[in-house]
Image (cartoon, rainbow, N blue to C red):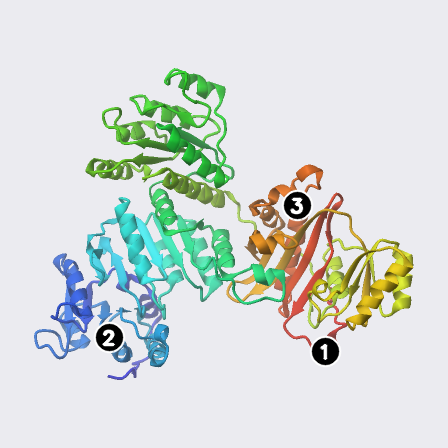
Amino acid sequence: MTSTVSRTGPLSDASAEANRSLTGLFAPRGIAVVGASRTPGKLGATLARSLSGFAARGGNLALVNGRDETMYSSVQAATDDGPVDLAMICVPAAACPGVLAEAARAGVRAAVVCGGGFAEAGGPGIGYQDELAAVVAETGIRLLGPNTSGFLAPHAGVTASFVPGAAQVRPGKVAVVAASGGVNHALSFLLAEAGHGISLAVGLGNAVDVSAPDVLDHLAGDPHTGAVALHVESVADGPRLVEAVRRLSALRPVVALVVGQHDVGAFAASHTGALATSWRTTRAALAQAGAVLVDDERELVDAVGALSVTRMRPVRDAGVGLVTAQAGPGLLLLDDLRGRRARVPELSPATRDTLATLLPPLTFQRNPVDTGRPGPELGQILRTVATDPEVDVIAAYALHEPDAVDLVAAARDGRTPDVPLVLGLGGTGDDVVRSRRALLDAGIAVATEPRGVAAGIAALLSDARARSRPPRLPGPRRVPTGVSGSYDEDQAKQVLDRLGITTAERRACAGRGDAHAALAKIGGPVAVKILDATVLHKTEIGGVHLGVTTAAELDAALDRLDAIGADRCLVEKMAPAGVDLVLGARRDPIFGPILLLGLGGTTAEALADVAIRLAPLSPDDAAEMPAELSGHALLDGWRGGPVLDTAELGRVAAALGDLLVANPDLDEIEVNPLRLTATGLIALDAVVLTRHVPREASDAQPRQ
């Protein structure tokens, strides 16, 4: 077969829309297995067996193999006997493009290529994948894969997977969208073990056509889906993914696991570029779009499981009420919650008075509430804590002790309409499994251990906090345009001056006479720096000398600059002591303009303690970035130090983002350090990097 496709004419708008829909893929009327086999162990035989349940439910299942007279000779022959929306293609990689073209000609709306041997294998496989892409582009057929283990759509009765046990996954409310087919099944099985059913589970594979944004947009209209687990390995189109997550998260929660934390990436010219790895930027972009972030697959299961059955009202700073029937697990849970920066407020006197009538006097009742052992009053205790004015969600844990209390009944009795409950139910055996399932069926989130409860609570808090933020679109703000060419430090700071960002008094000097005049004018102490647009890391080559006060000290500094070939220097007033930050805006190759804030010096690099946002950004949203830093306490008057005005920081950061967006030739602008002093923020150094830097443009200046 060849991959040549003949078109009968342009598609109508309605036909084109139908072709782009994923209904034919995930809810087909009929399925053809192309390359079906009766030889056990072959992919075609395994898929035919997996799809037997679809046929048992009345779906049209057609087996296609031109060398087996008991099967259809072609996809066209199969479609002549009944509707076929989906083709499962189980032939060698070289033959796949031709089969895909044949399926498209026969009117098949979607296909899955499970096998490998494409771009992931290199060599000829790259060409085969390009041929698949060409067929998709020419015909409009939707393609999942190649190099995927398929998908599960239990509500439609479709197990389009060759993985054993996949057909046992029951229908439910959680959707999985995974970059990897293997991860797709691993998450589905973990969710099944935790008692959750699946609405849809998709492994994208090489994603020649159907990608994560496509599936997310499809799930926005899926009535079976309550929450979505998103697994991300790499991103081809950052803005499209962000918009898809933003649209979906407004309707139902999205929990994202991003792979690649330890990818150090290539060396970048600036700290901003070095710190804004693809992993950090992807996580920040998804969080900004409304996704809940998790760090591993177990946390993903606990988080998406909780959000699939309950969702908090939008609230910015929710309070957690903690109820535990055993003190030790309760301490683990409390410690985990505080590590996630969850607020566990002390309960009101009225709440404690009521609890005192329900609990022995020696139990702790301020929050956490330790019952000592689960008893018949557990439901009333839960309800009492839920009615406290500072409590927005309840985290609870108890071991399965059916002789002491019916935990399912207590949880049902204790929950209130506006305060969700996440219950950790410890134990083993069939009775525990049944109890967990009963709780889930009752709309109560369940975990198996304290860490799982904390993960579920953190997901509810993050989702509620994201939805509490009003949409704040950046308003029109005037910034310099025409930024191009090369910029030395003085010219870069002139750009900052135009943005209203404070810089120190300084003079650009062409010789010793200029430098001495500058020292006399400014007064010491001053910093003396090499002034050269091609030198980005001045300190590393001995190009910075601090604390210069006298003429003799200035001459000594100038001698050292002469030794490294400096033609010009900058004489600048020394700034007062304070806390150093790094603030940068750069053009990310995947997501476009981004902002990065971190602690300055070597701290940000050593600890990777940074906050990232997509630009443009409103000043109010930018003002929230410092709170994400692990070292944010240093900005709040630590040991008598200066206190950050977050509104000022927000204005400065938003201005850098606006500048980047307004200047297509600007690749990056970084202020490092941006020093927090007792009188406010002051930019001590600045770097401007543009796309085209002609030699003669060293005196380039922006226009307002």
Q: Are marks 3 and 1 in contact (CB under 8 Å)?
A: no
Local crowd at mark 1 within 10 Å, few (<14), some, or many (≥20)? few
Q: Is residue 72 visible?
A: yes
Q: Are marks 1 and 2 in contact (CB under 8 Å)?
A: no
Of the two numbered discs 2 and 3 in the rendering, the one whose residue sits closer to the viewer: 3
Q: State the count of labels.
A: 3
Res. 371 image quadrant: top left
Residue 279 screen position, x and y as percent: 48, 59
Q: Amino acid at mark 3?
A: Ala
Residue corresponding to mark 1: 695
In the rendered structure, find residue 137 and report the number of the disc placed on it.
Answer: none
Q: Is residue 57 above or below residue 9?
A: above
Distance CA(mark 1)–CA(mark 2): 57 Å
Front residue of 549 and 208: 549
Q: Are marks 2 and 3 in contact (CB under 8 Å)?
A: no
The C terminus: image quadrant: bottom right
Q: Earlier in the sequence, mark 2 or mark 3?
A: 2
Q: Secondary structure at mark 2?
A: helix
Q: Earlier in the sequence, mark 3 or mark 1?
A: 3
Name the residue rendered at 55%, 59% in the picture: 276
Local crowd at mark 3 within 10 Å, few (<14), some, or many (≥20)? some
Residue corresponding to mark 3: 647
Q: Secondary structure at mark 3?
A: helix
